[in-house]
Image (cartoon, rainbow, N blue to C red):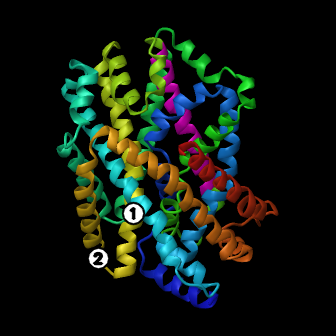
């Protein structure tokens, strides 16, 4: 069976669009991980949960998950040369079992539904970027401005622009579309956010923000919720969902070292989170708006524009901020949409263009009915709490347990000069599975 799979993979690899370079693949994976959650959720959590005490836990969990789950999903996709639907199917077939496609539908559908909700928020970002250029964002009441585009059917034009611009990139394929996009916008994101972080450093009373961010409250380590928040933040910062990283891995050459790629993704996920916190937290403290840190999306769409209005050259700062946010958002969105698009191409032999059109149609029809901020919030929270960790758990079980430890080790070893140590099985088969199981169960308990 393994020989047949290898021959099939070799044939697929010769005809399948792939990333042209390791840097292109790595930047694409970083782009999928660097999203809106880091911008409005991480700053709130790190301050609320103990400052640098929380950061220590976050880094530990980030490393544990990065060197287990990220490696696994990359290697799983590359080994099977397909997305979650086909990968789960092939994994069970190796054991003489069926219904792998049924299980693969869980992360796949979750990925599509999250993308649909995410595209609504990306539409808001585009509206704010254009509004920053025209000056309307800073000339109007921030609360009213946000309310205007977050009601029922209130942001259709911007939502459609978000979808059209995303699918225009995706129809070009992996190497000519997604890879080139990430090679341009990911470096720009980090450069622009670093520039904003420097600007915020010089705002009055910004030191209070750094105290909030880095002052360690060691007593918070005695709080079980601090550990869960750090684990959850690390989990979502790495975009582990049993779909997006698998699909990008399926386009990766056997010559590349997935351990090295996973290390880069882990490092830059941390850097993006810290940069986001270094922009947002000093800014809100400079204007005594620290209570708004826990407001979620309004932090970005109401609080930050309020701050920009009071800064010199606020219009330009607002443009840079929302352009950077769009860069982070669109790279995540193309990753989310890629899994269902690839499924249509692989399972039904549809062309790339037709597959993109089908997903674009579904996303538009469903998306316009959830444009209300309250609805899309519930939509995204439900999927993030239940479907995302379940998809990651299933993918981990499939690759590390169903495929077997020898198969997993062999596929991760591809392209790697240094032999994997004994840590590999411990980290992947046990530590990762247990951590994801904890995230999943805790989410259920909290919501009940």
Dot placed on the residue nearer the N-terminal end, 1 or 2: 1
Q: Residue furthest front?
A: 448
Residue nearest the viewer, comparing 445 with 332: 445
Corner quadrant of residue 334: bottom left
Residue drawn at (54%, 46%) of the image: 448
417 lies above or below 42: below
State how far apart marks 1 and 2 are (Cα): 14 Å
Magenta-colored segment: predominant secondary structure: helix
- Residue 372 in which image quadrant: top left
Rendering coords of residue 400 (x, y %) = 68, 69
Residue 338 is tagged as 1
Residue annotated with mark 2 = 351
Q: Identify the residue shown where x is 48% and y is 77%.
A: 101
Look at the image and give the residue range highlighted in magenta: 261-285
Q: Name the residue rendered at 23%, 35% in the picture.
A: 149
Foreground of the two, 443 or 408: 443
């Amino acid at each position: 069976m393994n020989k047949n799979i290898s021959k099939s993979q070799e044939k697929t690899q010769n005809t399948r669009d792939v990333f042209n370079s390791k840097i292109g693949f790595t930047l694409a994976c970083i782009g999928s991980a660097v999203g809106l959650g880091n911008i409005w959720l991480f700053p709130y959590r790190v301050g609320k949960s103990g400052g640098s005490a929380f950061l220590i836990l976050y880094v530990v969990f980030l490393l544990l998950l990065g060197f287990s789950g990220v490696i696994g999903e990359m290697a799983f996709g590359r080994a099977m040369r397909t997305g979650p639907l086909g990968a789960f199917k092939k994994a069970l077939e190796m054991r003489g079992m069926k219904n792998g496609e049924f299980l693969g539908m869980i992360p796949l559908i979750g990925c599509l539904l999250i993308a649909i909700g995410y595209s609504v928020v990306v539409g808001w970002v585009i509206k704010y970027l254009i509004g920053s250029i025209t000056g309307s964002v800073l000339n109007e009441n921030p609360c009213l401005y946000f309310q205007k585009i977050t009601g029922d059917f209130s942001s259709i034009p911007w939502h459609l622009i978000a979808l059209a611009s995303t699918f225009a990139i995706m129809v070009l394929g992996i190497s000519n579309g997604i890879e080139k996009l990430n090679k341009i916008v990911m470096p720009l994101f980090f450069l622009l956010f670093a520039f904003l972080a420097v600007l915020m450093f010089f705002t009055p009373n910004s030191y209070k923000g750094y105290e909030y961010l880095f002052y360690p409250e060691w007593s918070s380590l005695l709080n079980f919720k601090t550990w869960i928040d750090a684990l959850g933040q690390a989990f979502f910062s790495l975009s582990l969902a049993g779909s997006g990283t698998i699909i990008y891995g399926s386009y990766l050459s056997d010559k590349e070292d997935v351990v090295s790629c996973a290390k880069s993704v882990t490092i830059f996920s941390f850097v993006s989170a810290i940069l986001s916190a270094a922009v947002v937290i000093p800014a809100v403290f400079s204007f005594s708006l620290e209570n708004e840190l826990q407001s979620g999306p309004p932090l970005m769409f109401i609080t930050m524009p309020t701050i920009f209005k009071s800064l010199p050259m606020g219009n330009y700062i607002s443009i840079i901020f929302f352009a950077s946010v769009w860069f982070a958002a669109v790279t995540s969105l193309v990753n989310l949409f890629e899994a269902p698009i690839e499924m249509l191409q692989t399972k039904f032999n549809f062309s790339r263009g037709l597959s993109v059109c089908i997903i674009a149609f579904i996303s538009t029809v469903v998306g316009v009915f959830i444009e209300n901020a309250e609805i899309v919030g519930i939509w995204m929270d439900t999927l993030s709490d239940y479907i995302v960790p379940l998809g990651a758990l299933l993918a981990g079980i499939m690759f590390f347990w169903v495929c077997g430890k020898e198969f997993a080790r062999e596929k991760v070893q591809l392209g790697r000069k240094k032999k994997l140590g004994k840590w590999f099985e411990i980290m992947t088969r046990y530590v990762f599975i247990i951590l994801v199981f904890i995230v999943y169960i805790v989410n259920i308990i909290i919501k009940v």
